[in-house]
Amino acid sequence: MIQLHYFPGNASFAPHVLLRELALPFELIPVDRANNAQKGAGYLKLNPAGRIPTFVDGDLVLFETAAICLHLCDSQPDAGLAPKPATPERAHFYKWLMFFATTIQPDVLMYYYPDRYTTDPNGGAAIKQAAARRLMGWFDIVEAGLGDGPYFMGDDYSLLDIYLLMLARWGRPLANPPRDMAKIGAIARRILERPAVCAAIDAEGITGDFLT
Ligand SMILES: N[C@@H](CCC(=O)N[C@@H](CS)C(=O)NCC(=O)O)C(=O)O
């Protein structure tokens, strides 16, 4: 059975929701972050980057959230959670997924773990502040790139909606949080009503408003 190594609200959230949307049998394996288990020898054998999530399906062991999500979408093409390959829609889908994973996510890490990005013991605050400013700019770009919905890709619900919801949660402490942007906020609230999303939130033990 598929195993997903997760921590509540971490990057494991997107593949977790996807597994539920695809109705695949899976087991959630909690990572003991309090004891830094993601940097322990056993975990590093699966995921040498020491990050969450890790996906295991028999001999297939994957790290990197976007890769795990793409693999899941591709394994169930009839579910339609990604546009058909070699179409303009798929090209835009790749563009936004890569923007999320390689532009927004690194700045999220810089925002939450600024001390990792400097050797100056007093440098963290400035790094966090600059990351916050960049993040608000990136979310502005996403907001400006969205059409009339109801979903990220227009009429079709996709992985991008799930990923955006996760990013919107991570962006909740920002001065201009994504939940307050008209289009991002509307998509996030719509996605929060989906049974698979509610079930993932419950299973991860996340309480309170997901976006505040
Ligand atoms: N690029 C990685 C980043 C994953 C990541 O940063 N995960 C965070 C949680 S959201 C993590 O593992 N933090 C714990 C740590 O870095 O020790 C991915 O998308 O899978």
Image (cartoon, grey):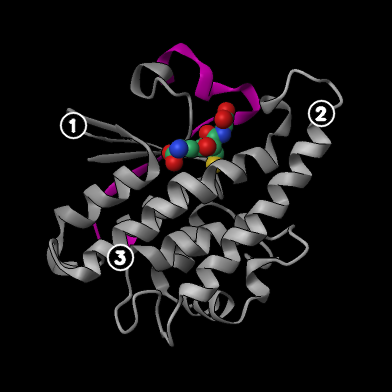
Tell me the kind of residue under disc 2. Gly
**Segment tinted magenta in the rendering:** 20-43
Residue 11 percent across, percent down from the top left: 49, 46
Q: Name the residue tied to disc 3.
A: 92
* Label 3 Cα neighbours within 10 Å, binned few <14 / some 14-19 / many ≥20: few
Nearer the camera: disc 1 or disc 3: 3
Q: CA distance from mark 1 to mark 3?
A: 32 Å
Q: Is residue 86 rendered to the left or right of residue 136?
A: left
Q: Nearer the viewer, residue 164 or 35?
A: 164
| Residue 29 belongs to the span the image colors magenta | yes
Q: Secondary structure at mark 2?
A: loop
* Label 2 Cα neighbours within 10 Å, binned few <14 / some 14-19 / many ≥20: few
* Label 1 Cα neighbours within 10 Å, binned few <14 / some 14-19 / many ≥20: few
Q: Secondary structure at mark 1?
A: loop
Whether the residues at callouts 1 and 3 have beta carbons within 8 Å, the answer is: no
Tell me the kind of residue under disc 3. His
Identify the image quadrant of the C terminus: bottom right
Q: Nearer the viewer, residue 166 or 136?
A: 136
The earlier-in-sequence mark between 1 and 2 is: 1
Residue 156 percent across, percent down from the top left: 29, 79
At 81% across and 38% down in the image, what residue appears?
A: 126
Q: Image height check: is 131 above or below 83?
A: above
Q: Name the residue tied to disc 2.
A: 123
